[in-house]
Amino acid sequence: MKEIKPTYKKQGNITLFDNEETMFKIVVLQRIYHLSDAQAEYQIRDMLSFRDFLGLASGDKVPDGKTIWAFKEELTKKGLFWQLFDEFYAFLEEKNLIMHEGTMIDGSFVEAPRQHNTREENKLIKEDRGGELWNPEECDTEEEKKRKANKKRQKDIDARWVKKGGEKHYGYKTTQKWTREASSSRKE
């Protein structure tokens, strides 16, 4: 493969970098390492591994942040940004190199009021039979039926005890996951 030398031309106060392959590689580095345009410029100047990946020798010019921004803006205007990344992902899958990026996972714990149940009640709740508890029976008086119905409304049988950082907590575990595919509205 012949070596591609980058060329520059001025357009206003932005220097355009004519090597689209190198520019796309810069955008890939930005997405992998979550870099802004200015951070990408700095890291390319600073890190030999970035220069090697881009095919730049130590004396070659490095695109500045405005140039990187202008390249991404041009891709977006032409509707090519996501098309190029889709082709890039397909290439990685073909080579059995899958890049998982853009996935964010949030794990939280929501506290709930602590319940004061008997051991038998807790046992039924753990067995997912909490719905059987505090049901009024036919032999109960009206007052007892009301008391059981009120107690059942106040009980939280879905919350669980967990240990986090050596401390016990009562409540709900929540996990949310967002991926690039889930937010495809950006792709339109």
Image (cartoon, rainbow, N blue to C red):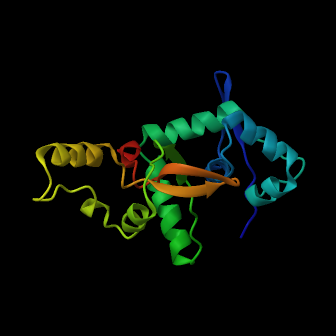
- Quick one: 10 or 86, which is closer to the camera? 86
Q: Position of residue 143 (x, y in %)?
A: 16, 43
Name the residue located 45 percent from the left edge and 63 percent from the top edge. Answer: 119
Q: Position of residue 52 (x, y in %)?
A: 81, 59
Name the residue located 25 percent from the left edge and 63 percent from the top edge. Answer: 132
Residue 116 visible to the viewer: yes
Q: Is residue 32 left or right of residue 92?
A: right
- Quick one: 123 or 112, which is closer to the camera? 123
Q: For the N terminus, which image quadrant?
A: bottom right
Q: Is residue 42 left or right of residue 140?
A: right
Name the residue located 42 percent from the left edge and 67 percent from the top edge. Answer: 123
Q: Position of residue 140 (x, y in %)?
A: 15, 54
Residue 9 visible to the viewer: no
Q: For the C terminus, which image quadrant?
A: top left
Name the residue located 36 percent from the left edge and 67 percent from the top edge. Answer: 124
- The quadrant holding residue 7 is top right
- The quadrant holding residue 34 is top right
Number of numbered discs visible in the structure rendering: 0
Q: Position of residue 152 (x, y in %)?
A: 27, 49
* Residue at far top of view: 12
Q: Is residue 154 above or below residue 138?
A: above
